[in-house]
Amino acid sequence: MTKTSKSGGSTGGIGNVLGLIGIYILIYFVCSAMFIGLFHTGLLKNMEVLMYRGIAFIVITGVVAAVVMGIIRKFWGFITVRDIIMMFVIFCCVNTVLFVLVPVTVERSVSVFMLSYMEENSDQTFTQESVGEVFTSKYVTDYGAFEKRFNEQVETGTIKQNPDGSYSITESGKFIVSAFRTVAEWFDTDRRLVYPNEN
């Protein structure tokens, strides 16, 4: 009888753990979809910096995730307050990393150069036009930024050289463009970067 009781308790414990993991995963994906959906609403539209708006949305949906976990706790007693806190922390941490690595990187490719140049010449003042000219002359021309990126794409196989010396995009290149466009659609980033012919 004792062995049966221990076995039953062990089985119940494993079931609770698996159930909790399933709840974490379900809430994470549902709230992540909500996070992406917020970019297509007018909420916080006055925040023009994508990163700030995204972080605000992560906190909002993280709170929603924690509240949902709290509601589920009323029906499943094995969920603790620690699980509610962990849901919020895990959701916010994972989505912040993914958000900064992909959408924010796509949106801010020029920022590092611009800020570094202005810091090195902080004894001067600038106009938007003068910084743009410096970017074109130094970053694009002197540093060979375009050539470097172009050759990089040839080496990675997203662009191929044709027999006549011209270049064409490959199937893998088209796949990457499709992925970037999906990210741009999800997070409502500047469409001009992924649809240059439309602007």
Image (cartoon, grey):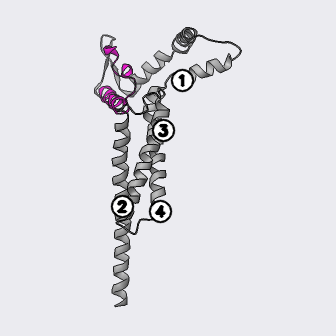
Tag 3 residue: 55
Distance from disc 2 to disc 4, alpha carbons, whole Å, reads: 11 Å
Front label number (2 vs 3): 2
Q: Amino acid at mark 4?
A: Val
Q: Amino acid at mark 3?
A: Ile
Tell me the magenta residue range. Answer: 172-199
Distance from disc 2 to disc 1, alpha carbons, whole Å, reads: 43 Å
The mark nearer the N terminus, 2 or 3, is 3
Q: Is residue 141 left or right of residue 116?
A: left
Q: Amino acid at mark 1?
A: Ser
The mark nearer the N terminus, 4 or 3, is 3
The mark nearer the N terminus, 4 or 1, is 4
Question: Residue 43, how many percent across, how many down?
Answer: 40, 33
Circle 3 residues within 10 Å: few <14, some 14–19, many ≥20: some
Distance from disc 3 to disc 1, alpha carbons, whole Å, reads: 19 Å
Say the numbered circle drawn on residue 72. Answer: 2
